């Protein structure tokens, strides 16, 4: 199943020239937080039940006041600042050094101790759900963050139905917590929405977005995270909402003012300084794994034959690149359709290349290719070639169709959509 980056930026086009200051290499733009979802499709996090056997067990608190008549109680905490949460528990001894270093590596996080405090602060909030004697589900959020549910009001959560009520803010909760800003612990609050999925699990999100200005351009981004570690960028079209797969992600480019306008690399949002980070000064022919940009050439050893594969050898053809893995359910589900499509294509006009990532063993990959009759070239991603890291691939499958000049026509396309595009292009 594909997962997407949950952060985005949208540009409201203004149509003016940027000042010399705005054309500088690095730009930090202060932003404000606005209530509501803006033009973004809401995303939901999952309230996970605490696991007393996990490495997080010592970080758990013990809130009071859960109704005694509730059955099937699920209690969990929502991190409001993951970095501060981990840091303060490491300093307190609730997280050991090995786990602390592992989290830094997996999160690609270098702790900045000027933005963190060893003082234990309320950078989390607890919520609990349960069934009453009639089988109805109820939820309580510890909005005042005093680890006591008895002074809070229980509510029946809406069942989430995508396409119907994902924008609803019924039972909106105003939560209080602590932030460490400029060397001081400060009180803060935010809006929280909780809905129940069909399977009974609870989802939550924050109906807020950020807003800032760059010249006459207005930039907005949804607050799908409590600390805005990352964001993706899209240009807004009037009366349009945006889904996650339409976003331009971290280290990819936004062009303001049309194809020949100014290019900005997205460097994310710094919530501690409350600024959007952009990078300017990029020329027209930059490489980037996104629609309309040139694919940076790559090469590798073909998994079955051992022959070298180089993207330059496919110039003049359409090339479909698929980052996938035998462990990825969404990837495997598309394989039969891709096999059928590949058999019908003129290989003088179109070719496929797969980059298999995260494989437990070469033998497993070889067996899968033989069983499913996958005939197109494959490169096994390894620490030595690591094309996944090179192209910043963080979700599977990730795909792209490259045109005969080496430019990306479209990314993240299914086998069905790929066939439709090729049918049109090869008329």
Image (spheres, rainbow, N blue to C red):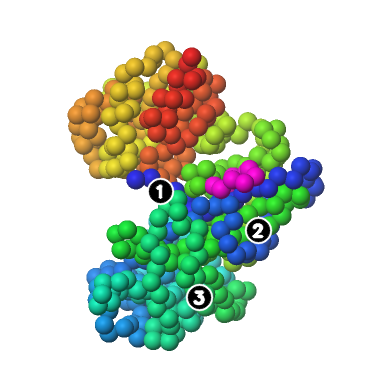
Q: Kindly report the secondary structure that dominates the magenta region of the rendered protein.
A: loop
Q: CA distance from mark 2 to mark 3?
A: 21 Å
Report whether 307 appears left or right of 315.
left
Measured as percent of width and height from the top left, residue 285 is found at 63, 31
Task: Name the N-terminal-most of marks 1 and 3.
Answer: 1
- The dot on residue 3 is 1
Report whether 279 appears left or right of 37.
right
Q: CA distance from mark 1 to mark 2?
A: 25 Å
In front of the other: 139 or 220: 139
Is residue 265 shown to the viewer in this render? no
Is residue 402 shown to the viewer in this render? yes
For this orientation, the residue located farthest to the front is 134
Measured as percent of width and height from the top left, residue 176 is found at 52, 78
The N terminus, quarter of image: top left
Which residue appears at 47% of the width and 71% of the height? Answer: 171
Give the extent of the magenta segment: 233-242
Q: Which residue is mark 2?
A: 211
Q: Which residue is mark 3?
A: 175
- The dot on residue 310 is none
Which residue appears at 45% of the width and 74% of the height? Answer: 124
């Amino acid at each position: 199943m594909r997962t997407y980056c949950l952060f985005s930026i949208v540009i409201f086009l203004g149509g003016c020239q940027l000042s010399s200051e705005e054309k500088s290499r690095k730009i930090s733009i202060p932003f404000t937080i606005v209530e509501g979802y803006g033009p973004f499709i809401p995303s939901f996090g999952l309230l996970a039940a605490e696991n007393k056997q996990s490495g997080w067990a010592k970080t758990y608190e013990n809130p009071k006041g859960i109704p005694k008549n509730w059955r099937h109680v699920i209690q969990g905490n929502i991190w409001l600042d993951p970095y501060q949460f981990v840091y303060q528990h490491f300093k307190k001894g609730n997280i050991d050094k090995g786990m602390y270093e592992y989290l830094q590596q997996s999160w690609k996080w270098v702790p900045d101790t000027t933005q963190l405090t060893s003082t234990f602060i309320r950078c989390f909030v607890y919520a609990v759900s349960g069934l009453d004697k009639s089988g109805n589900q109820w939820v309580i959020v510890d909005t005042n963050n005093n680890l006591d549910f008895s002074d809070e009001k229980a509510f029946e959560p809406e069942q989430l139905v995508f396409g119907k009520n994902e924008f609803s803010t019924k039972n909106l909760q105003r939560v209080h917590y602590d932030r460490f800003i400029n060397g001081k612990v400060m009180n803060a609050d935010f809006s929280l929405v909780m809905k129940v999925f069909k399977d009974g699990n609870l989802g939550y999100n924050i109906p807020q977005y950020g807003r800032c200005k760059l010249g006459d351009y207005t930039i907005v981004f949804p607050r799908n995270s409590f600390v805005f570690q990352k964001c993706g960028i899209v240009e807004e079209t009037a009366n349009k909402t945006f889904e996650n797969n339409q976003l331009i992600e971290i280290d990819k480019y936004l062009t303001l003012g049309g194809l020949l306008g100014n290019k900005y690399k997205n460097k994310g949002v710094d919530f501690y300084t409350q600024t959007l980070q952009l990078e300017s000064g990029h020329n027209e022919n930059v490489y980037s794994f996104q629609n309309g940009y040139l694919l940076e050439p790559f090469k590798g050893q073909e998994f079955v034959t051992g022959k070298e594969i180089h993207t330059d050898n496919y110039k003049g053809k359409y090339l479909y690149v698929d980052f996938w893995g035998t462990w990825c359910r969404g990837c495997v589900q598309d394989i039969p359709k891709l096999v059928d499509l590949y058999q019908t294509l003129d290989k003088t006009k179109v070719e496929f290349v797969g980059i298999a990532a995260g494989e437990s063993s070469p033998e497993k990959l070889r067996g899968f290719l033989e069983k499913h009759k996958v005939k197109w070239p494959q490169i096994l991603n390894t620490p030595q070639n690591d094309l996944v890291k090179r192209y910043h691939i963080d979700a599977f499958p990730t795909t792209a169709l490259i045109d005969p000049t080496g430019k990306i026509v479209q990314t993240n396309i299914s086998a069905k959509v790929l066939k439709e595009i090729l049918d049109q292009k090869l008329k």
